[in-house]
Amino acid sequence: MRRSEYKKVDPDLGILASRTLFAFQRELFTTLAQQGHPRLRPRHGAVLAYLDAEGSRATDLSAQSGQHKQVIGTLVDELVELGYVERRPDPKDRRAKLIVPTELGLDQMARSDAVVQEIERRHAATVGEAEWAAFKRVFREITT
């Protein structure tokens, strides 16, 4: 059978994971735009989702997000320009820089956390608390 004739009835894990990610990002970034953060894009999540309020090193953001360090550097440049983060000397290592959220960045982080909690609350209500907890547990197990 040729690929063009092949039709999957049951989507595989990759398709389901991508659908989940894209739906999640669409809702998160649409809601953030409505709440005063219209210039953020899903790609910025590679930094913002892993950024500590006290600051993070770019190498740590790279490792946590799975993105190449140069990609993180480009995203940090964009976020600096947008006013969400700034680079500061790392007090633990004077050669290194910390990526630190600004007040705008901290506002985005708090709003993002609230949106994510609401998305998860809604999913738990749809499938049941126990099913949602089991889904997250299994998802954590297969992604670590």
Image: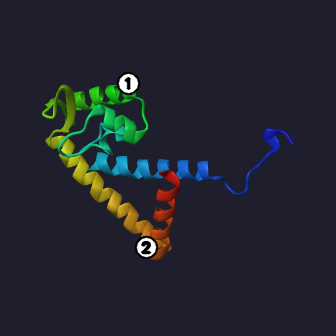
Give the Cα separation between the discs numbered 1 and 2: 40 Å
| Amino acid identity at mark 1 | Gln
Which disc, if any, is residue 125?
A: 2
Task: Please say whether residue 97 is visible from this viewpoint.
Answer: yes
Q: Identify residue for label 1.
A: 70
Give the answer, above or below, for where 93 lies relative to 18.
above
Q: Can you name the residue that lies furthest to the right here?
A: 1
> As drawn, is 60 to the left or to the right of 15?
left
| Amino acid identity at mark 2 | Ala
> As drawn, is 89 to the left or to the right of 42?
left
> As drawn, is 3 to the left or to the right of 54?
right
> As drawn, is 110 to the left or to the right of 2?
left
Quadrant of the rendered image containing residue 99: top left
Give the answer, above or below, for where 57 lies relative to 133.
above
Q: Nearer the viewer, mark 1 or mark 2?
A: 1
Residue 73, percent from left and from top: 32, 26
Observer-nearest residue: 63 or 102? Answer: 63
Observer-nearest residue: 119 or 100? Answer: 100
Badge 1 vs badge 2, beta-carbon distance below 8 Å: no
